[in-house]
Amino acid sequence: MTQFFSLCSVILSFMFLLESPPLFLSVVIILQTIILALIISLFTLSSWFSFMLLMIYLSGMMIIFIYVSSMASNEMFHSKSRLFPLLLSLMLMFMALFLINNTASPSDSNNTLDLSLIQNTAVKISKMYSKSLSAMTILLIIYLLLAMIMVTNNSSFSEGPMRSAK
């Protein structure tokens, strides 16, 4: 499963490098964020952290998306690269192959509450905030603080509208 998400992430990264319209780039970033949240939820066995990270990041991206869409002109999106449709069809083909392979295997799911799963989740969450990962946690906190400050400064109404009237 993580291989599929990693492959989708790599394909989206190539799409990000090939195209330049700001609205398309923000959609690619949103898709990358969703894939990252899915990968985090697979590794931690608890989806609360990935869900909260996704909600915080997407709320910031919505503000940036609104800002960029109000500043950008209403031009049609034309792909300059011939590699873009190939990458998109490749990603859809891998998705279809992955779904076919997963539906063919029998399901071993058990609907009962497993106590060891809860204990493993608590251990993994405590490892996430361990001393060895403290630098990454502090970097993430600083990144979110700076993003909040930049969004607040961009959306201040004291200087008038951001777009000049014609």
Image: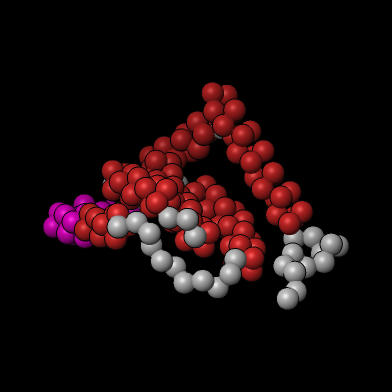
Residue 48's spot in the image, x, y percent?
51, 50
Question: For this view, does 22 lie left or right of residue 99?
Answer: right
Residue 130's spot in the image, x, y percent?
55, 28
Q: Residue at x 74, y 48 (%)?
A: 149
Question: For this view, does 51 lie left or right of residue 82?
Answer: right
Q: Quadrant of residue 101?
A: bottom left
Q: Residue at x 75, y 69 (%)?
A: 164
Q: Residue furthest bottom?
A: 166
Q: Residue at x 58, y 57 (%)?
A: 61
Q: Residue at x 13, y 57 (%)?
A: 104
Q: Quadrant of residue 155?
A: bottom right
Relative to the observer, which residue lies in front, 160 or 9?
160
39 to 127, vertically: above or below? below
Q: Which residues are magenta?
A: 95-112
For residue 35, say whether it is visible. Answer: no
In the image, residue 87 lies in the stretch drawn in magenta = no
In the image, residue 108 lies in the stretch drawn in magenta = yes
